[in-house]
Image: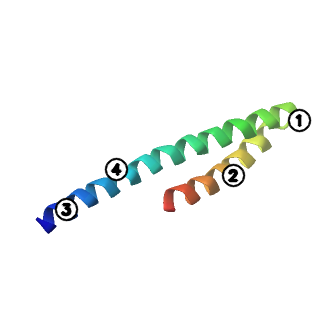
């Protein structure tokens, strides 16, 4: 009985990890597009994309490993 509970708990943990991974990619892409938009507004799209990607990678790491 205890082994069955352990398997169910592990399945729940795996599902939450997958959901966090999916969410973190959406946040990364969102940061990239926000950076691109801000960069376009100031005439430096390439710099905006790089800053957005940097912020996105940091946000990805925080959410994915938390």
Residue 5's x, y, as percent?
Answer: 19, 62
- Contact check, label 4 and label 2, Cβ < 8 Å: no
Residue mark closest to the camera, 2 vs 1:
2
Q: Residue at x 53, y 48 (%)?
A: 24
Q: Local crowd at mark 3 within 10 Å, few (<14), some, or many (≥20)?
A: few
- Contact check, label 3 and label 4, Cβ < 8 Å: no
Q: Nearer the viewer, residue 58 or 17?
A: 17
* SS for callout 3: helix
Residue 13's x, y, as percent?
Answer: 34, 57
Residue mark closest to the camera, 3 vs 1:
3
Residue 38's x, y, as percent?
Answer: 81, 36
Q: Local crowd at mark 4 within 10 Å, few (<14), some, or many (≥20)?
A: few
Q: In this view, does 28 lie to the left or right of 34?
A: left
The picture quadrant where one finds residue 14 is: bottom left
Q: Local crowd at mark 2 within 10 Å, few (<14), some, or many (≥20)?
A: some
Residue mark closest to the camera, 3 vs 4:
3
The residue that mark 4 highlights is 15
Q: Residue at x 68, y 52 (%)?
A: 54
Q: Residue at x 27, y 60 (%)?
A: 10
Number of numbered labels in the structure image: 4
The residue that mark 3 highlights is 5
Label placed on residue 55: 2
Give the residue at the far left of this rendering: 1
């Amino acid at each position: 009985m205890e082994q069955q509970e352990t398997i169910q708990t592990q399945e729940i943990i795996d599902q939450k990890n997958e959901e966090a991974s999916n969410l973190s990619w959406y946040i990364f892409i969102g940061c990239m597009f926000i950076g691109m938009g801000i960069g376009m507004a100031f005439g430096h799209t390439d710099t905006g994309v790089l800053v957005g990607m940097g912020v996105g990678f940091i946000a990805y790491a925080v959410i994915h490993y938390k």
